[in-house]
Image (cartoon, grey):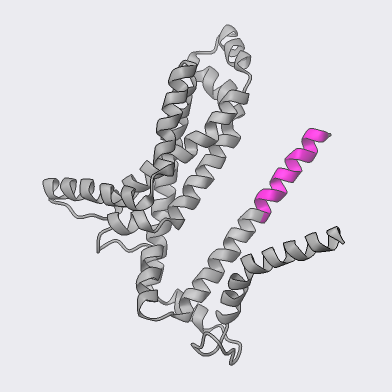
């Protein structure tokens, strides 16, 4: 009886989580704009989506910002994690508490504060908010996530390999790339993926720092939904969901393959 109850409970949870996504995908193929009646199967909303210049430009801006900000955040976060790791235990704890503040801090506070700062800088130099302001904002809130992914790998690594590499004639920089980086690379990669995901997904901070001339996908979708739900949004959301699902499947496949090699 308990086993059946657990199965029913888990089924209801999964239905609650994925039913909205299934409905969204189904109605992305709906011939009419109705959100309640399925009148026929069509691909016209997908065709209109790829011919919509505003959405395509917003998608390009979003991907460009995500790539640039996640790369810089990964570099800065990895260097910061190494620096924090080399501190004493008390200073390390204090620095990690500071790192956690941007994560816990509400996005509305971060967005407004960055908007005030960037508006001051823009007025001082006579420039407009746009790509540079969004990138700086995304780098700022992505760095803590990289640090939190790299720090556990630094604690797990074998520091004697770094010392042995130096004893065998490697310079400190070469010893780092040969002995330390391979050990913490999974954490660096996880931090990059998390930074990339948060950058693409972010709306609040982007809304306050993007300005009027630099649309991103979240802000464009928000502006479109304020007027009327366009079926093109359903099509776009369905594509994003499928892409994320494929990345998840590939990631799990690679992880399982590595585990099997380690077991052998």
Residue at far front of view? 1
Residue in the picture at 58% in, 62% down:
243
Percent from the top left, x then y, of residue 259?
A: 76, 39
Quadrant of the frame with the N terminus: bottom right
Residue in the picture at 36% in, 42% down:
140
Q: Is residue 260 left or right of residue 144?
A: right
Quadrant of the frame with the C terminus: top right
Residue nearest the observer in this picture, 112 or 240: 112
Residue in the picture at 33% in, 47% down:
137
Count of labels in the image: 0
Which quadrant holds residue 58?
bottom left
- Asked whether residue 136 appears in the rendered view, the answer is yes
Percent from the top left, x then y, of residue 94?
A: 42, 25
Q: Main secondary structure of the magenta part?
A: helix
Residue in the picture at 61% in, 87% down:
41
Q: Which residues are the magenta region? A: 249-263
- Asked whether residue 79 appears in the rendered view, the answer is no
Q: Is residue 152 left or right of residue 219?
A: right
Q: Vertically, is 187 above or below 131?
A: above
Which quadrant holds residue 30?
bottom right
Percent from the top left, x then y, of residue 157?
A: 62, 23
């Amino acid at each position: 009886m308990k086993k059946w109850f657990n199965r029913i409970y888990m089924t209801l949870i999964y239905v609650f989580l994925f039913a909205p996504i299934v409905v969204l995908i189904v109605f992305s193929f709906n011939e009419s704009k109705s959100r309640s009646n399925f009148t026929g199967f069509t691909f016209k909303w997908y065709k209109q989506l790829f011919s919509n210049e505003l959405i395509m430009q917003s998608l390009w801006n979003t991907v460009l910002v995500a790539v640039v900000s996640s790369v810089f955040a990964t570099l800065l976060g990895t260097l910061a994690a190494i620096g924090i790791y080399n501190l004493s235990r008390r200073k390390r704890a204090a620095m990690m508490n500071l790192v956690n503040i941007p994560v816990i801090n509400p996005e509305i506070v971060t967005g407004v504060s960055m908007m005030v700062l960037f508006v001051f800088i823009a007025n001082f130099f006579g420039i407009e908010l746009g790509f540079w302001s969004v990138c700086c904002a995304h780098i700022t809130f992505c760095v803590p996530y990289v640090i939190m992914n790299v720090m556990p790998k630094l604690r797990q690594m074998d520091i004697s390999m770094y010392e042995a590499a130096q004893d065998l004639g490697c310079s400190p920089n070469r010893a780092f790339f040969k002995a330390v980086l391979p050990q913490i690379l999974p954490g660096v990669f996880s931090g990059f993926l998390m930074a990339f995901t948060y950058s693409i997904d972010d709306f609040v901070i982007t809304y306050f720092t993007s300005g009027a001339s630099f649309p991103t996908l979240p802000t464009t979708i928000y502006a479109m939904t304020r007027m009327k739900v366009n079926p093109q949004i359903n099509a776009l959301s369905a594509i994003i969901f499928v892409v994320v699902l494929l990345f998840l499947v590939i990631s799990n496949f690679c992880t399982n393959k590595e585990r099997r090699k380690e077991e052998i």
